[in-house]
Image (cartoon, grey):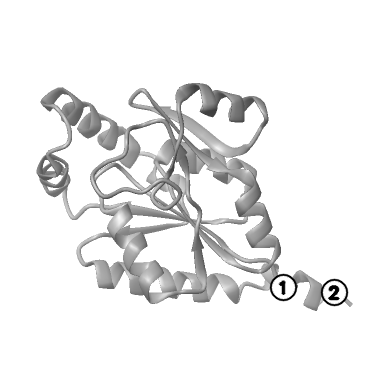
Amino acid sequence: MVKGLLIVLSGPSGTGKGTVCKALLKKRKDISLSVSCTTRAPRAGEKDGVSYFFKTREEFEKLIEKDAFLEYADVFSNYYGTPKSFVDAAIDEGKDVLLEIDVQGALKVKAAYPQGVYIFLVPPSMEELENRIRSRGTETAEQIEARLGKASAEMKLMKKYDYRIVNDSVDDVVNRIEAIMTAEKLRVSRHEDETKE
């Protein structure tokens, strides 16, 4: 059986990763979203087990000790992590899995899953990124400045990804991700069992 794709969508905070993922999952029922764990407080409308698995720091650190994460990171004083068991099981069953994670986490996943598909989402401009972060209204001026500084540093890591997509239209981004998935599924290297003589 051909394994599923691990599609990693990443990029600086505020680039619209969550919006793109929701649109892609609405259009493609055959893609599973890997739900991450976090120690940050839920934002309005977020649900445990759907948006994230919300954990205390103590609970999260126990999971780290059990090697339960594909990757985890401490971002702005909160842990975020990708549960390993779900991703492994889905890919082995031939299902495509979508991970929406920050740049730090994506590069750790790439070290463990080099055969994954790594997509870097960028804003149309840094000014637009700043507007998006400020319009959330969820962070202090100091937190916003920290995010913008981090975003600038993360943009320099784009060359470590397979693909770059500018988020100027959610529909266009979804279409481009689908095109990437189609191309990746046609790679000869993903069908090695069929090419063995």
Q: Where does the image place residue 182, in percent across and percent down from the top left? A: 51, 76
Left or right for 3, reference 106: right
Residue drawn at (60%, 30%) of the image = 63
Image position of 161 with respect to 80: above or below: below
Picture quadrant where residue 154 is located: top left
Residue type beneath disc 1? His
Q: Secondary structure at mark 2?
A: loop
Residue 191: mark in rendering:
1
For residue 133, what is the image quadrant? top left
Residue 77's disc is none
Residue pictured at 62% horizontal, 56% vertical: 115
How far is the residue under mark 1 from the one under mark 2?
9 Å
Report if residue 176 is visible in the image: no
Give the image location of residue 12, x and y in percent. 30, 42
Q: How many marks?
A: 2
Query: How dense is the environment of label 1, judged by Cα within 10 Å: few (below 14), some, or many (20 and up)?
Result: some
Q: Circle 1 — which element?
A: helix
Which residue ends up furthest to the right in the rendered image? 197
Quarter of the image with the N terminus in it: bottom right
Residue under label 2, please give it: 196
Q: Is residue 123 left or right of residue 40?
A: left
Q: Is residue 123 above or below residue 64?
A: below
Residue closest to the eye, 66 or 109: 66
Q: Residue at x 46, y 70 (%)?
A: 180
> Considering only vertical position in the picture, is 50 above or below 109?
below
